[in-house]
Amino acid sequence: MRTNGRNLQGLEMPIEYVVRRVGLFFVIVWAAATVNFLIPRLAPGNPIREQLLQQVATGGAGATPIEEVVQAYEARFGLDLPLWLQYFNFLWDTVRFDFGVSIARFPTPVWDTLTYALPWTISLVATATIIAFVIGSLFGALLAWPRTPRFVHAVAPPLLTMAAVPYYLLGLILMYVFAFRFGWFPLGGGHQLGTEPSFTMTFMLDAARHSVLPALSLILATLGFWALQMRGMMVTVQGEDYVTLAEAKGLRPSRIFFRYALRNAMLPQITALALTLGHVVSGAVLVEIVYGYPGIGTLLFRSVQNFDYPVIYGITFLIIVAIGLATLILDLVLPFLDPRIKYSRE
Amino acid sequence: MRDTTVDTEQTHAEGVLDSTVEPSSDVKPILEVRNLHVSYDTVRGPIQAVRGLSFQLMPNEVLGLAGESGSGKSTLALALLRMIKSPGRIVEGEVLLDGRDLLSLSEREMRHVRLADIAMVAQGAMNSLNPVMRIRDQIIDAWTDHGIRYGRQESEERVADLLRWVGLRPDVARLYPHELSGGMKQRVVIAIAISLRPRVIIADEPTSALDVVVQRQIISTLRRVQTDLQAAVILIGHDIGLMAQSVQKLGIMYAGKVAEMSPVYEMFDEPMHPYTRMLIDSLPSPDQKGQLRGIPGITPSLLDPPPGCAFNDRCPYALERCTTEIPALEEKRPNRMVACHLFTEGQ
């Protein structure tokens, strides 16, 4: 028969709730953006002086006195204005997704650096997260199921051990074995040097080949987390009276497993998945760096190194929006998955 | 409905051919339990939760099984449906449904016996329904898995009929469990239990977690559908006051065995087993307000049960042989089965 997850009749979503929830999303984004604006300004160090001093150190400085250059650039970036004016400029720019230009990679617009790195990260980290979630959850559920064949239990210890290894270390090991020793996969990067990103078949296949090892290290490292959490939930759910009654009803074991046990054990997993997906845009910094992957993680790392305020803003804002969106979608979807969750406050 | 499944027809056939029932009586028991042993394995050895239990359930009979916690009531209920989970296991014995031994069936065959032949009204009304499924779907999925398929319209009608049968409005079908009260949920559980017209219904503490008024309603609903279906019912509980009003025959369980099983009026008029006597004496009555009498002592460890009668150390009438010889459950008076050395047969 109909499953309740898809059968939405009788569960109407009050428009008032949706409006309030979307409004909350914008408030969260605004508040987070404001904090995001203030915090770096409390930190010591001037981005422009920092950049120039680096150039001096590497012998790239010109004849102009440094202070004059600093002042010129501060005017160029609007850093000489009073703080409140900087704040309003910042908000106005943010609304238009104009994060200015990168200081470290002057004069590339921040938006361009973000939109270049984002697809790389999303395709790698989101795919890896979803694969790890599906396999891990199913595996965890099977571990807690009495009818599960023995060989599944045999796979558990190595997988759970793998989960205890930090994923950058796992990344290095995989790289050494499969890229360096066997040469099955490229050593790093997102695509072959000298090729331009495009939507051609050859490029996509090449990019996929480059992402296998980083994805594998992410999957192997996070699989255990999903599996353990799911196993715990399944054990709890199996003690519930409705699972006992389901068996007394003479239901097929597969129906009891999926519709009664797994279906209920999944609910906390879904919440965790939504939040994890929200974090996807921050990239997997360490894995990306280990593999020299051109994603957001690498970009973030370089920007922090270079005091590249605008890029850091851009990335942080992206993360805020992504997490805000993830929780928004979660709040709108969860009542359909768990009817006990009410839309409105009573 | 039930007759549409192949399995149940086989059950009938085998029941007719079976000759293990005494030829003298014209009515054969629908369910017969012989020498059932159920243990839970622990590191310190097996805990014998049910130790050689035997009884017969006649068609259309309402049998009560009462006993204190740990006397093996719920273990028995699960064992009859072969739903004992590891580390528990059925050690030996026979459970004959219409003469067919359920313990020798394959798991697949046993699955079809559940609900279609033996249904359970479970303990814990608050939590017996899947919180993420509508009532309608939880009724229909049982039919589907027993190989019965109706059209959409017919399913809806049958669900509505079932709900009306147990005293619920048909529109309960589209609600979720958390939208129902405890009593309504237990009615739904009863509706599920009777949906395939089983011949035996096991109700394991069907009224626990319900208030007294609702308890009466649930019991009377159960009695009504039992009469409609002509099914036999095993009512398990510890409230022998409630039991006395709702069953015909009452079995008193103690330490995994039946101490006494008698028609309920005769048992209350003249309890035979000392445990039964003390249990009935311990019931609070309005005449003796403020006085609560218990039974001194504690139940024996089922890890290492005593060699004789399990009740001998709490029994004021214990004889020498009670400490060494386990009393068998025998018909000491007409219709009265007692496991006690104090009585000799036929007296």
Image: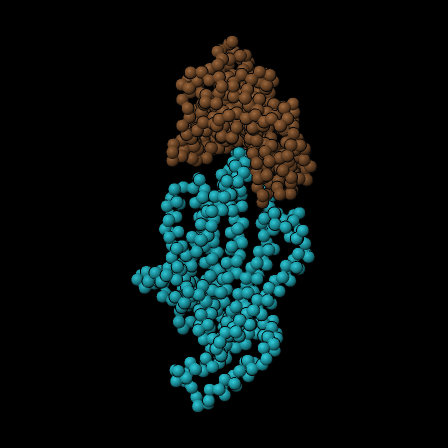
The image shows residue A127, relative to residue B276, as above or below, that is: below
The residue depicted at 52 percent of the width and 21 percent of the height is B275
Q: How is the image coloured?
A: by chain
**Coordinates of residue B286 in the picture (x, y in percent):** 65, 25
The image shows residue B168, relative to residue A170, as above or below, that is: above
The quadrant in which residue A82 appears is bottom right
Describe residue A303's horizontal placement relative to residue B58 as left or right. Answer: left
The image shows residue B36, relative to residue A194, as above or below, that is: above
Name the foreground residue: A308 vs A178: A308
Name the foreground residue: A196 vs A6: A6
The quadrant in which residue B106 appears is top left
The residue depicted at 40 percent of the width and 41 percent of the height is A149
Residue at far left of view: A181
The residue depicted at 54 percent of the width and 67 percent of the height is A318
**Coordinates of residue A55 in the picture (x, y in percent):** 42, 82
**Coordinates of residue B148 in the picture (x, y in percent):** 57, 34
The image shows residue A100, relative to residue A25, as above or below, that is: below
Q: Is residue A302 visible?
A: yes
Q: Which chain is cyan?
A: A
Classify the position of the N terminus of chain A by image quarter: top right
Exactly how many numbered labels are in the figure?
0
The residue depicted at 51 percent of the width and 69 percent of the height is A315
Describe residue A143's horizontal placement relative to residue B280 as left or right. Answer: left
The hue used for chain B is: brown
Q: Is residue B9 visible?
A: no
Name the foreground residue: B188 vs B338: B338
Residue at far front of view: B290
Residue at far bottom of view: A63
**Coordinates of residue B293 in the picture (x, y in percent):** 57, 25
